[in-house]
Image (spheres, grey):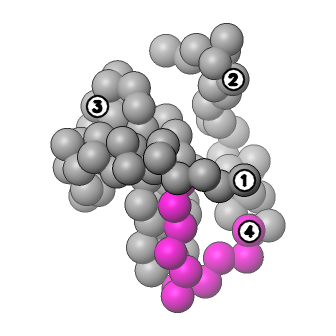
Amino acid sequence: MTRRHLGQNFLYDPSILTRIVQVAQLSRDDLVVEIGPGHGRLTKLIAENVKKIISGEIYEFNRRALHQQNPDFVPVEFLRAIYVYLIKIHFF
């Protein structure tokens, strides 16, 4: 479920997802912190190109979808803990 009033937009087009990863110029040595992975389509592509990815998702339905579509990822409970920590960080 997309919550557009919160600014959520899920990417589905494989060509756009691939282009985002290309433009990011990721390397096998990179650590990526992703806030709001949604269903994990971009997350999966990023994970294939970096050393490690840490994702945090606030919404339970997205955490379940992320874990169901990517069972090799970190357990859903861990993602919740990561999100709680990430919201305390001031990035700007």
Q: Nearer the viewer, mark 2 or mark 3?
A: 2
Left or right side of 13 for 80? left
Measure the alpha-carbon separation of dots 1 and 2: 18 Å
Left or right side of 84 for 32? right
When the figure is inspected, residue 5 is found, relative to residue 47, above or below; the finding is above
Does residue 49 show up? yes
Left or right side of 16 for 10? left
Marks 1,2: beta carbons within 8 A:
no
Q: Nearer the viewer, mark 2 or mark 4?
A: 2
Q: Earlier in the sequence, mark 1 or mark 3?
A: 3
Badge number at residue 64: 3
When the figure is inspected, residue 83 is found, relative to residue 31, above or below; the finding is above
Residue denoted by label 4: 24
Q: Earlier in the sequence, mark 1 or mark 4?
A: 4
The residue tagged with tag 1: helix, strand or loop? loop
Badge number at residue 92: 1
Measure the alpha-carbon separation of dots 2 and 4: 22 Å
